[in-house]
Image: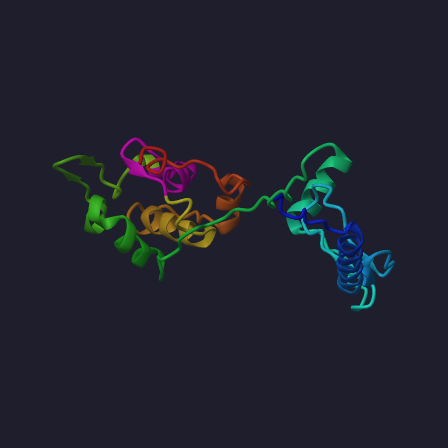
Amino acid sequence: MASPQKTFSVLPTLLLSLAVGAILGVLLLLLFGRHVGNPDTVSAVNSGMAGTTVINKDAGKEAAQPSAEATSTTATSQSGTAAQPEALPLSQTVTNTHFTGTGQEIYVQACQSCHQAGGVGAKGAGIYPPLANNPKLATAAYPETMVLFGNGGMLGFGHYMDDQQIADVVNYIRTELNKNTDKVTPEDIKKLRPTTPDYTIFGEAAG
């Protein structure tokens, strides 16, 4: 005897599916529906400029501020050329003045180790010509340029003495060691000193 065939009605299954779908739709609407179409929330589009943010009109209407890099890039693109730094003013810069005192005291600090006390000169590892009774010093321009720029084995002091100090030490070796009567002034040194602060003096270029 054949067993009775089980039959199922489609209607209850269909109704159950519709009910579940309706419930899910209500839940989705409650969760996400309030954000759809809200004109107060604007997403700033990332256009490659640094500093873009998401702006909310109700939160103080914050404006997106470009970063310093973006501002610099924008300025460069508008002008077509990179912004140039301001040129440094021309000056007679003395970078390291640690000599003090009178012309004789500056001589002791800067010159005596080579030219010896009293300017008598020396011979040894090098030849250091005497400054006392030296006829070359009769012309002021000679010791002025030697002290300012250096030459040969002589280190220049242009970056280490100011105009007054160079004038004082030149006057010492010319008057006290050589009996010349004409005096050198700071203005004389200023006329010889280049107006650019990075001029080359002997000794710095070699080292």
Q: Nearer the viewer, residue 43 or 184?
A: 43
* Rendered view: 37 above or below 119: below
Q: Quadrant of the C terminus?
A: top left
Residue 147 in magenta stretch: yes
Outermost residue toward the left in this view: 124
Residue at image x 79%, y 65%?
A: 30
Residue 94, percent across and down?
Answer: 45, 50
Residue 10 in magenta stretch: no
Residue at image x 49%, y 51%?
A: 186
**169 sits left or right of 53 in the view:** left
**171 sits left or right of 38 in the view:** left
Q: Nearer the viewer, residue 144 or 98?
A: 98
Residue 38, percent across and down?
Answer: 86, 59
Q: Nearer the viewer, residue 160 or 102?
A: 160
Give the magenta-colored segment's residue range: 137-156
Number of numbered markers: 0
Quarter location, residue 2: top right
Residue at image x 65%, y 39%?
A: 84
**118 sits left or right of 85 in the view:** left
Quarter location, residue 36: bottom right
Residue 51, percent across and down?
Answer: 68, 52
Residue at image x 18%, y 34%?
A: 127
